[in-house]
Amino acid sequence: SESDTTDAAGSAELRTPIVAVLGHVDHGKTSLLDEVRGSAVTAGEAGAITQHIGATAVPLSTISDIAGNLVDPADFDLPGLLFIDTPGHHSFSTLRSRGGALADIAILVVDVNDGFQPQTHEALDILKRTQTPFIVAANKIDTVPGWNPNPDTPVQATLEAQSDRAENRLNEQLYEIIGQLSEEGFSADMYWRVQNFRENIGVVPVSAETGEGIPDLLTVLMGLSQRYLKSEMSIDTSGPGVGTVLEVKDERGFGTTLDIVLYDGVLRDDDTVVVGGKNDPIVTDVRALLQPRPLAEIRTESQFEQVESVRAAAGIKIAAPDLDDAMAGAPVRVVRGRDLETVTAEVRAELADIEVVTEEQGVVVKADTLGSLEAIAAALEEAEIPIVRAEVGDVAPRDVAVASTAEEPKHAAVLAFNVDVLEDAVAEIERVAEVDLFEDDVIYQLVEEYEEHVAAIEDAQQEQILDKIQRPCRFRILQDHTFRQSNPAVVGVEVLSGTLKRNSRVVKWNGNEPERVGELKSLQDAGEDVDSARAGESVAASVDGPTVGRQIEEGDELWSELPEKHAKILEQELADEIPADELEALRMYLDKRRKRDPFWGK
Ligand code: GDP
């Protein structure tokens, strides 16, 4: 065929850089993407922007129309920009290629009023980890008090039309953001002062509401790409396509389909492809390549139209058999003209790159995509939390079953990131009470929630141990407070240090030898029975065994007896948990015992 002739010749071309939009919820990611699309329409180039599956392509000519004299198309040979439509870092961390980020460049959206928020920090972590170049869109400048809006104008022009007061307020907020970036280790400045966008982060003031600064944003993205990414944008336009799965989706009439971003080569509707699957790579034949149907033609029965081939960079839907086990974030490779084994091995190697280390014991982790699974695994590893099972997908009953087999209570947990919990899994969690479920869509919050849970379990365990253990206590019989001589002796006592508890054995020191004088049966404070008395408190103690005036006397210093094993646990494991006065009593007790036996309680 004709295209095969072209293939034989082979040809290199520059592809569109892939742009991702990240930032905290409500800071304006969606609005910004809408505004970019909207500006393209306003610029009279509606036909020129094309809606892909999961992405919008804005060609250079449209960017130049929007940017006015900021962009001269003659300065560029990259064809434009491809914006990924699903904003947020979840999709961003999904978007990977060969171990790096799939997005070539990113926009970090920060609300000028709100500054840095949890997901802003998380997005920065991801950008750092993947070493993705990015710019900051300081959004919502139109909300600065006293702002005079100038729709769709570049930043400098609108700044000139502002009062000093409004401009100063904006500057304060922008410098706040620049300061926060610097705290995160990024040197940043207003974009017009940045010379090298790889070393310094450019901050672009924008409004997704009024379009102010959008020309600047597109100009900076285009310039940055042209200057620093051009060498990476060269693709073989006849080469076999390579991409990443954005989403695995059921589509009426097509069954399970894949939304992918193609970042290299060409994909055709008669290609065989290899896709990363839950168990093994999936080998399948493309049945159809689908693009959204232009709005004008939407009345036809399908919202999609079939295309024969697509060239990177593009978003496209693949309809093919056997896609049920495909995973979001997994690689897709076209086999065309190559050995199937080689391509399968490539896919396998890419998957192995992402694979998460699991241990014999640990928590169960479920995430929406391979990329986010990897990001969580990294966060858990840093927090020294082991993982027993890590998978892409919703929380299912067998995840709960795996968690319930944990040897330690703290590992009986399922951490779910941005996924649903299936109904029968909810029932299973209710049934096996020991399994705890944690859900969040911010990674470090998910990890923190789990860590708090572990801390609570450990506290409870220690409290239980403390409860069962004899506690050191030094107390004195008060003068003129003998209420009963014997059987049992009832005397007023003052606790000097430690905690006096019911049912403890009472000793009196004879030199360094503790002599048991009886058992403390009950304690009364102002006529009421109490279980214990703390240092500084005075209570009435009834002691079975001694007679006042014989084995014990008013003014005597007495101690609760510490079994050696308990003394050892207190000193070696619980020293940080018990109050200072109790620790002091423990030390005194140990000192005396160790004068006779240096290894006592060791
Ligand atoms: P996302 O969660 O980051 O995608 O944020 P959205 O795009 O949904 O925006 C959140 C809210 O902020 C919406 O109510 C938007 O209308 C509003 N918003 C976004 N950008 C701007 C802006 O530049 N100016 C003003 N005034 N409102 C904005």
Image (cartoon, rainbow, N blue to C red):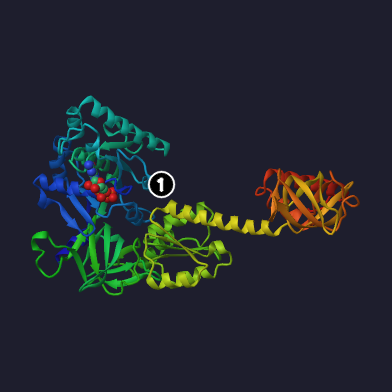
Count of all numbered marks drawn on residues in the image: 1
Residue in the image at 31% along x and 33% along y: 173
Place of residue 304 in the rendered image (x, y in percent of width and height, measured from the top left): 16, 66
Q: Is mark 1 within 8 Å of ligand 1?
A: no
Position of residue 162 in the picture relative to residue 390 (left or right): left
Residue 77 quadrant? top left
Residue 286 quadrant? bottom left
288 to 589, vertically: above or below: below
Residues 410 and 135: in front is 410
Residues 351 and 484: in front is 484
For label 1, the residue is 125
Place of residue 484 in the rendered image (x, y in percent of width and height, measured from the top left): 83, 53
Residue in the image at 55% along x and 54% along y: 455
Position of residue 142 in the picture relative to residue 189 (left or right): left
Whether residue 1 is visible here, answered yes or no, is: yes
Residues 348 and 38: in front is 38
Residues 337 and 9: in front is 337
Q: State which quarter of the image contains the N terminus.
A: bottom left
Place of residue 602 in the rendered image (x, y in percent of width and height, measured from the top left): 78, 53
Name which residue type carries label 1: Asp
Residue 518 quadrant? bottom right
The local secondary structure at tag 1 comes to helix
Q: Residue furthest top?
A: 164
594 to 154, vertically: above or below: below
Place of residue 515 in the rendered image (x, y in percent of width and height, measured from the top left): 87, 53
Q: Residue furthest right?
A: 550
Position of residue 166 in the picture relative to residue 121 (left or right): left
Callout 1: few (<14), some (14-19), or many (20+) C-alpha neighbours within 10 Å? Answer: some
Whether residue 20 is visible here, answered yes or no, is: no
